[in-house]
Amino acid sequence: MSPRLPLVTTAERRHRLGRRHRLAPSARAATVVEAADSVVALHATDAATVFLSARARLTAGGPAAVEQALYEDVSLVRLLSMRNTLFAFSAELAPYVDSSTARAIAVKERRGLLKHLDEDGQGLDARWLAEAESAALDALDALGPATGSQLSAAVPALRQKITVGRGKKYETQTGVATRVIRLLAADGRIRRDRPRGSWTSSQYRWVHTEPWPPVPAAEARAEIAGRWLHAYGPATEADLKWWTGWTLTDVRKALAAVGPDQVLLEDGSTALVSPGDTGPEPAPEPWAALLPALDPTGMGWADRGFHLDPAHKAALFDYAGNIGPTVWWNGEIVGGWAQRSDGEVVWRLLGSPGRGAEQAIAAEAARLASWVGDARITPRFRTPLERELVA
């Protein structure tokens, strides 16, 4: 008879979120890097998400603390990586992300741009692209931090226009500046610096930087998988494949290198945890959190059934599966929130968690409004409930 697997209850999985994702007040992080590392990475497609996700996990510090980490200390860096999506990682973890994921994206980006250049028929090729990239880097050295528009003004090659899909119904003329800048960023030769405007802006300036030191890809994937499993376990092979965007073969090799333990879940299925991480998770104090759109705690698994009532999915996700701003109580999504044009933070419950929960959520909403101050937050991916709340 095979040994009986340890049971991890749904309640214990939720306890883990409070502690490991730094969401319970007693578990909050002292630094932005600690906050990011607790969930492996912060989603960065929407500029405000990095700041609001960090805020929910910090003991103290306003937007300036996140800006310090991103632009002064450069202890937190944005990389195009998992699922071809922009994330913010600690500088310590960045080389592993680069080798495990970003390198393959950069190769694909370059191949795609060269294909478009060739099909355009103007004789633009790999040599032309290399010269354009070199000119862009020289311009950054001369200008200092610069926006894409400023780079285009300084580098004639970046003002080049090409035709994509020539002769087809979707034929369109487009400039190459955005694609060349994206490629340089994917290669780690430039990085995003302070944006124009406030911390909610995505109009970044760019700075010249050095590529990350190489790490063997298999070693890098094992490092990422190990950190993810500690933060998100119990979880499945399918969850990790969804979160990373890796091939199934790479996922299985990475997990084999980690050597996870298997546990039993309440629904009778099995899942994986870090080696030795099978014991009960102590319950933290009751906690409420208002997490932003695309927050990693809502986006860490392909199957989110343990913290989300399926009946609420339609209100909280957009058509593409992106989660909107959510209200949490003790590890469960219980509603959504939004910020109105006058700055008021409003929220709505989708269930009845109790009076104590409502009081804690109201206090957390007030803390969020104070932290945001004069800034205005409109998620890039609008969800039904968020739209209703600001109407």
Image (tube, helix red, strand yellow):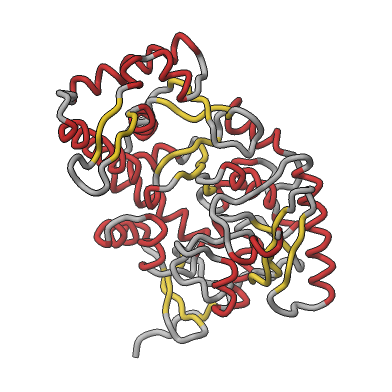
Task: Please report the residue visible at 64 percent of the width from the left and 49 percent of the height from the top.
Answer: 378
Task: Please report the residue visible at 60 percent of the width from the left and 36 percent of the height from the top.
Answer: 201
For this view, does 193 lie left or right of residue 263? right
- The image quadrant of residue 187 is top left
**In the image, residue 347 above or below residue 5:** above
Task: Please report the residue visible at 77 percent of the width from the left and 40 percent of the height from the top.
Answer: 374
Q: How many marks?
A: 0
The spot of residue 92 in percent (x, y) is 48, 37
For this view, does 347 lie left or right of residue 194? right
- The image quadrant of residue 390 is bottom right
For this view, does 334 lie left or right of residue 6? right
For this view, does 73 lie left or right of residue 132? right
**In the image, residue 225 above or below residue 63:** below
Q: Locate the C terminus and report the quarter of the image it occupies.
A: bottom right
Task: Please report the residue visible at 38 percent of the width from the left and 33 percent of the height from the top.
Answer: 182
The spot of residue 158 in percent (x, y) is 34, 21
The spot of residue 271 in percent (x, y) is 43, 74
Q: Locate the N terminus and report the quarter of the image it occupies.
A: bottom left
